[in-house]
Amino acid sequence: MYHICGIILDTFKVIAFTHKNLPLELIGKLHLSQEEQTDLLLKLKQHFQFEELLFLSTCNRIELLIKSTSDVDVSLTKEIALYLNGKLNNYEATRLADAAEIYEGEEGIQHILKVASSLESLVVGEREIITQVRKAYDFCNELGLTGDFIRLVIRQTIETAKEIYTNTNIAKNPVSVASLAYRQLRELGIKNDARIVFVGSGETNTILANYFQKHKFANFTVFNRTLANGEKLAKMLNGRSFDLKSISTYSEGFDVLVVCTSSSEPVITETIFETLKANETSRKVIIDLGLPANVAETAAKHSLVSYIDINSLRIQAEINLQLRKDEVIKCEEIIKHKTEQFNSLYAERRIELAFGEVPKQVKAIKDLAVREVFAKEVGALDPQSKEVLEKVLSYMEKKYNAVAIKTAKEVFLSARN
């Protein structure tokens, strides 16, 4: 139980189903679309009599932030999992409940600060999580699921994550192969009208394609063994798609060639490279993300080619990941400070709420004095005097309310120290 000068924080709980303890496909069974969240979450909140609720869903975690006086244990967690997905069998629901991480009070605050700061992410330092947390709060708030407490938690969470991303190097060194490949490409001065040819339309090429699209590249051609899959990537890029076999006759030239397939043999042979090059003498960039290499050595070492291969990228990714891990200690110090700061913020907020009725009571006393207790005396005053009296009383009323809250906060702070 967590006490801050008599104020109890342990009504705050977090249930976390994450990649650390569970396979992603099982976590995915708890994923809810926005439409499903709209239909289900308010019912879930009412069914379990939670005061407040926030539902966070990403590709590798499902988290529920809860404000409730109920105990949260494995049994309740299993009930919640089954409520989120009634099609779970007993084994799945039991495994989810047994592997879930449950946090209470200050530990819960610290956990969600770590989550938004990416310290709990599959890839430490990836910034996407802060946006996902903010969007989850906005959506749940619109549904009427959250209240004053979770509002304070999320405000402190976002502020903490921003400070960590600004004042540490946790996110400053790319650790994904795709992001490193794109960074090297931009360092070569490739312009946005470059002709970009993709060979393969799998996950890695799709991720890299997102970087191109985000930065306004527009000239794309996709070759893929299965034409339907290639067409999906081409549609996303507003480009063209062809069957992989037709690459041997493609002669429109290229500036950037991105290759990533499951082939165990080079897909870009010297002959195909010469065809793709179309007798051009301008510099070419080849990004080869295949394992083993998808580009023949003779093409990779061509005098006109700047060759970016997956092995060098992976080495840099590992170096960068270690640099990020070295920053974790700094991040944890910030989170520790922000958690302590939240305790004070929450206590002050409780004082403000507790004093919420004081202004009404003071106003009622003032009105009673003017209209009843001193009605005769006030009635004898001329209009100008009545106006002055009203100004004086209103001024005193306002100042008294401010002094009362300020004094209560000072008493709280002195008690803490």
Image: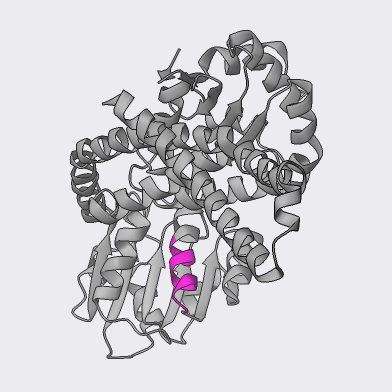
Tell me if residue 251 comes above or below residue 3 in the rendering.
below
Tell me if residue 64 comes above or below residue 116 in the rendering.
above
Relative horizontal placement of residue 281, taking residue 230 as reference (left or right):
left
In-front residue for pair 177/8: 8
Q: Position of residue 177 (x, y in %)?
A: 33, 54
Specify the segment rendered in magenta: 208-216
Q: Position of residue 266 (x, y in %)?
A: 36, 59
Relative horizontal placement of residue 192, taking residue 325 as reference (left or right):
right
In-front residue for pair 219/43: 43
Tell me if residue 338 comes above or below residue 80 in the rendering.
below
Which residue lies at the image location 40% right of the left edge and 52% below the top edge? Answer: 127
Q: Position of residue 144 (x, y in %)?
A: 73, 42
Q: Main secondary structure of the magenta part?
A: helix
Would residue 78 be counted in the magenta stretch? no
Which residue lies at the image location 58% right of the left edge and 51% below the top edge? Answer: 135
Residue 120 seen in this snapshot:
no
Q: Position of residue 95 (x, y in %)?
A: 58, 14
Res. 73 image quadrant:
top right
Its colouring scheme is: one colour
Count of numbered tags: 0
Tell me if residue 259 comes above or below residue 151 in the rendering.
below
